Amino acid sequence: MSVALAFTATNGEAYETHMGRWSKQLAELLLDFAEYKEGEQVLDLGCGTGSLTYALA
């Protein structure tokens, strides 16, 4: 069974275990890649673990 089939989107703990570990490590790298500058505005649509939002703050 693939991981995608085993993942339940309504289970926050499972999402954090599956994706959260990568989100925390990649947030700063994504901001560097996007060339985000201090003072620019970013729209957070409430997706994921919040790691990117924490990195922006």
Image (spheres, rainbow, N blue to C red):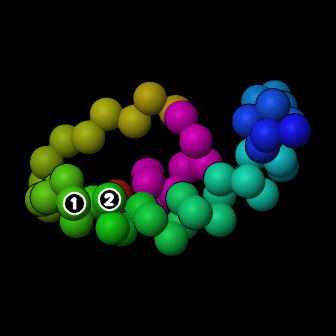
Residue 9 in the image, given as x and y percentages of width and height:
76, 30
Near-viewer residue (15 or 44): 15
Instruction: Give the residue number, with chain letter if any, for mark 2.
Output: 30
Looking at the image, which residue is at 58% across and 63% down? 22
Give the quarter of the image for residue 42: top left
Q: Amino acid at mark 2?
A: Leu
Q: Are marks 2 and 1 in contact (CB under 8 Å)?
A: yes
Residue 33: numbered disc:
1
Looking at the image, which residue is at 65% across and 53% down? 19
Q: Amino acid at mark 1?
A: Phe
- Residue 20's place in the image compared with 48, above or below, is below
Element type where label 2 sits in the image: helix
In the rendered view, does 15 fall on the left or right side of 54? right
| Magenta-colored stretch includes residue 3 | no
Looking at the image, which residue is at 14% across and 58% down? 35
Element type where label 1 sits in the image: helix
Q: Which residues are magenta?
A: 47-55
Residue 27 in the image, given as x and y percentages of width and height:
42, 62
Question: Which image quadrant: the N terminus?
Answer: top right
Residue 48 in the image, given as x and y percentages of width and height:
58, 42
Q: Is residue 7 visible?
A: no
Q: Residue furthest front?
A: 1
- Residue 8's place in the image compared with 50, above or below, is above
Looking at the image, which residue is at 19% across and 41% down? 41
Graded by Cα atoms within 10 Å as few (under 14), some (14 to 19) or many (20 or more), the crowding at tag 2 reads: some
In the rendered view, does 41 fall on the left or right side of 20? left
- Distance from Cα at disc 2 to Cα at disc 1: 5 Å
Give the quarter of the image for residue 29: bottom left
How many numbered marks does the figure carry? 2
